[in-house]
Amino acid sequence: LRDLPVFEYSPAQIKSAVTGRGRASKEQVQYMVQRLLHLRTPPSPADAADGVAVALCHCSVGMLAAQLDAVAR
């Protein structure tokens, strides 16, 4: 393949990154995705919100890693 990095997050990590609670419901994830992205309505179907939540989780984890790397230097 093309040596692309692969990242994996548990459902609890994703929910915690988006809602602040690792045991959040699908509805809570939809609501927070809507709020975080300033959408008029929650993403529908719920699976769409899940996909966006994974991306938001990755962004927050990436930002944290960059900050930790900067501190370590």
Image (cartoon, rainbow, N blue to C red):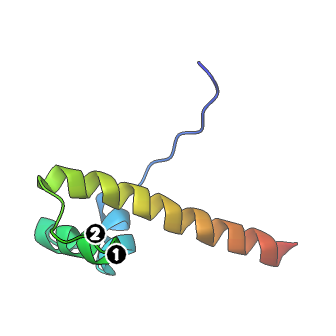
Question: Is residue 43 visible from the viewing direction of this image?
Answer: yes
- 10 Å crowding of disc 1: few (<14), some (14-19), many (20+): few
Reply above or below: 50 against 73: above
- Kind of residue sitting beneath label 2: Val
Reply above or below: 41 against 47: below
Residue reaching furthest top?
1
Residue reaching furthest right?
73
Tag of residue 36: 1
Q: Position of residue 59 (x, y in %)?
A: 51, 62
Reply above or below: 4 against 38: above
Q: Residue at x 29, y 79 (%)?
A: 21
The image quadrant that residue 20 belongs to is: bottom left
Tell me how many marks there are: 2
Asked whether disc 2 touches disc 1, contact meaning CB atoms under 8 Å apart, the reply is yes
Residue carrying label 2: 33
- Say what secondary structure mark 1 lies in: helix
Question: Is residue 10 visible from the viewing direction of this image?
Answer: no
The reply, left or right, for residue 31 in relation to residue 12 is left
Q: Residue at x 22, y 69 (%)?
A: 29
The reply, left or right, for residue 2 in relation to residue 21 is right
Quarter holding the C terminus is bottom right
Q: Residue at x 38, y 65 (%)?
A: 13
- Kind of residue sitting beneath label 1: Leu
Q: Residue at x 14, y 70 (%)?
A: 25
